[in-house]
Image (tube, rainbow, N blue to C red):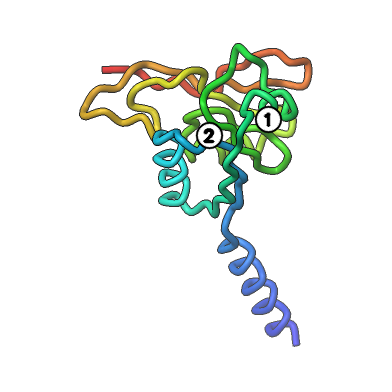
């Protein structure tokens, strides 16, 4: 009996670990880099619910994205915003931070996921927004 319970617990843990992460992505219909970022997420195991919007400014305002952190598309995972070209690995880190409202890569830096352009990579940071609406640097990506 004990062995059966252990096996059941192990199986349940494996099944839970295999569940895909789902993120909602809001984007403008005409944005190619948004589609490239969605591909980056899918390549990294995310299931993406793609929402084409007519008023991204209203979406960002509704989700609490400060204008200083704005980019072209906005994702939502676990009730937190993911603004711009945030790497998938940093979204996973965001999920582990209950103190943060969201994370952003402001602007559209070349070399960030979805903004690849040959070998060029501009330096950029992933910025977290805490509950007091203060910025925290979550990750630094150097340019070349």
Q: Are marks 2 and 1 in contact (CB under 8 Å)?
A: no
Image quarter in which the N terminus is found:
bottom right
Most foreground residue, 52 or 77? 52
Q: Identify the residue at horizontal 30%, vertical 22% (top origin).
A: 121
Q: Identify the residue at horizontal 68%, vertical 83% (top origin).
A: 3
Image quarter in which the C terminus is found:
top left
Q: Is residue 109 left or right of residue 4?
A: left
Q: Is residue 109 left or right of residue 93?
A: left
Residue farthest to the left, as pictured: 119
Residue farthest to the front, as pictured: 54
Upstream in the sequence, badge 2 or badge 1?
2
Residue farthest to the right, as pictured: 132
Q: Which residue is mark 1?
A: 59
For marks 2 and 1, give the CA distance.
11 Å
Q: How many marks?
A: 2
Q: Identify the residue at horizontal 47%, vertical 45% (top origin).
A: 41
Most foreground residue, 51 or 114? 51
Circle 1 SS class: helix
Circle 2 SS class: strand
Q: Where's residue 2, x and y in %?
A: 74, 82
> 10 Å neighbourhood of mark 1: few (<14), some, or many (≥20)?
some
Q: Which residue is mark 2?
A: 28
Q: Identify the residue at horizontal 69%, vertical 72% (top origin).
A: 9
Tell me the quarter of the picture where residue 19 sits.
Answer: bottom right
> 10 Å neighbourhood of mark 2: few (<14), some, or many (≥20)?
some
Q: Where's residue 67, x and y in %?
A: 63, 14
Residue farthest to the bottom, as pictured: 1
Image disc number at residue 128 = none
Q: Where's residue 127, x and y in %?
A: 57, 20
Q: Where's residue 132, x and y in %?
A: 78, 15
């Amino acid at each position: 009996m004990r062995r059966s319970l252990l096996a059941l617990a192990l199986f349940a843990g494996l099944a839970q670990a295999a569940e895909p992460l789902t993120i909602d992505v809001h984007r403008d219909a005409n944005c190619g880099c948004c589609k490239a970022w969605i591909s980056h997420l899918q390549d990294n195991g995310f299931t993406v619910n793609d929402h084409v919007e007519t008023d991204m400014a209203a979406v960002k305002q509704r989700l609490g994205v400060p204008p200083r952190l704005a980019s072209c598309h906005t994702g939502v995972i676990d009730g937190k915003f993911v603004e711009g070209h945030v790497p998938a690995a940093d979204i996973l880190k965001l999920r582990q931070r209950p103190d943060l409202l969201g994370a952003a890569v402001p602007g559209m830096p070349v070399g960030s996921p979805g903004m690849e352009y040959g070998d060029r990579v501009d330096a950029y940071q992933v910025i977290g927004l805490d509950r007091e609406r203060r910025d925290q640097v979550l990750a630094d990506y150097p340019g070349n």
